[in-house]
Image (tube, rainbow, N blue to C red):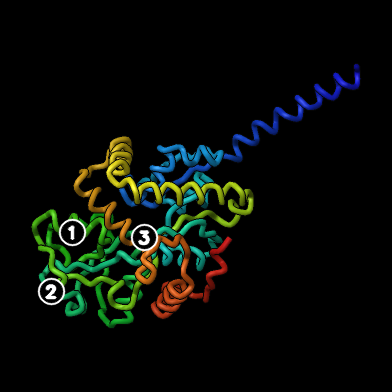
Amino acid sequence: MNQRLTAIILAIVLALPLHSQSKKDNTIIFTPQWTAQAQFAGYYAALEMGFYKDEGIDVIIEHPNASSGAVDRMRKNQSQATILPVTQAIFALDRGVKLVNLLQTSMNSSLMIVSRRGKNPLNQKGAKVATFRAGYYQLAIAAAKELGLDYEWLETAGLLNLFIAGAVDASIAMSYNEYYQFLQTGLIERDENIVFRFADHGYNIQEDGLYMTRKEYDRNPGLAQRFARASQRGWEWVAYHPEEALQIVMKQVKLNHEATNPTLQRLMLQEILDQMESYESGEREYLLREDMFNQAVQLMLKAGIIHHEHTIKELLP
């Protein structure tokens, strides 16, 4: 009887800390790279539809702010996962931030340059071009340098404001976001002669992927894999339920007090889903492509944006 009682008490004592640790180990704070919008619809859907819970994960989505970007939050252990384009992941690797690509949602480049002067951006050598302060710009700078465009880059957090004011000759834009904003101003019309789409000119390099630091991944690879699996399920659900997904996106938009509208978010979502399909296979493959990775490395090396050779293995689990 005493042995049985001792065994029961021991089991209870051992179970208590394990239960507490289990809850901690199954929580992921996820920081998308930007503010709430349809670009992250698959993750919102996975949370709303309970796909993360199905995998036994408690996911908390916290968007970045002006003082704390997504990569900085991961460095400080304030979040465990984020979204990065391939070029920015390479840029981070070059500066000693070890990352793991959990899931590659983007299969193509959405990056473009839009002229404010009604001209072909290739004919605007030396032009003043607005660019983001964070993310996506590395490909633009590297490709423009290779093309000999000699742009004067103006880093800003307000591309739309500079474009409206006419303070720049052209601007970087994403085909799913800023391009539609520029069109809505009425300052430009939908005209392929005033845009440079990188994907159409030999610079089709993947963008959004889901990342963790290598340290965080190694701490619990099973959790990371379940997180990726549920996230992919979220994107697949969005692809088949775009209108329902839009409602989920707008819910996040309102929660985060973002200034946008359903029309813009619907356009964004459709473009995002289109860019998730491989140009070759027409499928959503969710894989990081070695040829695109290697092209990005070589472009960034030539442009002096990075200083070391990198291989795709550095980002793989």
As helix, strand or loop, the secondary structure at mark 3 comes to loop
Quarter of the image for the C terminus: give it: bottom right
Q: Residue visible at 35% across and 51% down?
A: 239
Work out whether residue 236 or residue 101 is closer to the camera in this orientation and state it: 236
Which image quadrant is residue 20 in? top right
What type is the residue that disc 3 sits on?
Met
Q: In terms of sequence position, does the residue under pointer 2 or pointer 3 come before the other? A: 2
What type is the residue that disc 1 sits on?
Leu
Tag on residue 162? 1
Relative placement, left or right, of 67 versus 52 is left
Question: Which residue carries the number 3 mark?
Answer: 276
Give x and y (percent) for residue 86. Answer: 43, 65
> How many angstroms separate mark 2 from mark 3 (CA)?
29 Å
Q: In terms of sequence position, does the residue under pointer 3 or pointer 1 come before the other? A: 1
Question: Which residue carries the number 2 mark?
Answer: 119
Q: In terms of sequence position, does the residue under pointer 2 or pointer 1 come before the other? A: 2
